[in-house]
Amino acid sequence: MGEHRSVGIDEGQRSQHGWSSLSGVPGSIAIVSRYAVLLRGINVGGNKRIAMADLRALLCGLGYTDVATLLQSGNAVFTSAATEPQKLAGQIEDGIATELGMTVRCLVRGSDELRAVIDGNPLGGVATDGSRLMALFLSAQPDPQLLAAHDPRELAPEQVRLGDRVIYQWCPDGILAAPPVMAFVEKQLKVTVTGRNWNTVTKLAALLDG
């Protein structure tokens, strides 16, 4: 979960931001955290076009604050009352379906989780170009039996490493020339995957910290 902060808000602010979990006492203390949401498969070719202004408006409408987006590939950061990232992902998916009429899978990571992805990078010594190092975020940790039968590291033993709900892939000859690890994982390990290059990952972390 994200790094927690305590914020004092009054009754009117609680209503405005939709934080119904707070008590009705003015001056209640809300525990809030910073999160990043990654949308899967939007603004690629002509499919599932979502303007970032619309995404920001949707997140604000869900009661999140400090909302900012990055690039056009479906990356945003926000502050919310501290809760499980998976619950936030479901809220955002439901909001996109209701407000924008699309089915889009969303993965949410807290600020500490995203920082752990960066700090745990096992390919930092060989990956010399952030645009060619991919972090493939998984919706869940793969089933151990499926992973044993379909290990994505076998696609490129020197260039693929596993982390906690993330797969690191170094693509020295470019993304298009690299083995299709993301498609392999979704098909064989039965989890949703969305990928971001390392430049985007570190920029998202900077937005969360800011």
Image (cartoon, helix red, strand yellow):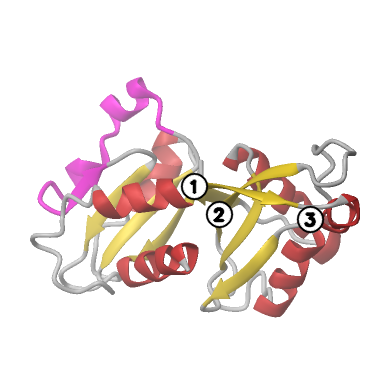
- Which one is nearer the viewer's eye here, 198 or 187? 198
Q: Is residue 151 left or right of residue 207?
A: left
In the image, which residues are magenta?
A: 141-162
Crowd around label 1: few <14 · some 14–19 · many ≥20 (10 Å): some
Crowd around label 3: few <14 · some 14–19 · many ≥20 (10 Å): many
Can you tell which quarter of the image residue 127 is in? bottom left
Measuring from the top left, give residue 48's x and y in whole percent. 67, 69
Instruction: Give me the disc on residue 21.
Output: none
The numbered mark, 1 or 2, whose residue comes first in the sequence reads: 1
Marks 1/3: CA–CA distance: 24 Å
Q: Would you name the residue on which mark 2 appears? A: 34
Marks 3/2: CA–CA distance: 19 Å
Instruction: Give me the disc on residue 95.
Output: 3
Q: Which residue does the image show at 38% across and 64% down from the upper left?
A: 201
Q: Would you name the residue on which mark 1 appears? A: 3
The numbered mark, 3 or 2, whose residue comes first in the sequence reads: 2
Measuring from the top left, give residue 141's x and y in whole percent. 41, 33
Which three-letter amino acid code belongs to the residue tagged 3?
Gly
Label 1–label 2 contact, CB within 8 A: yes
Which three-letter amino acid code belongs to the residue tagged 1?
Glu
- Which one is nearer the viewer's eye here, 75 or 43? 75
Crowd around label 2: few <14 · some 14–19 · many ≥20 (10 Å): many
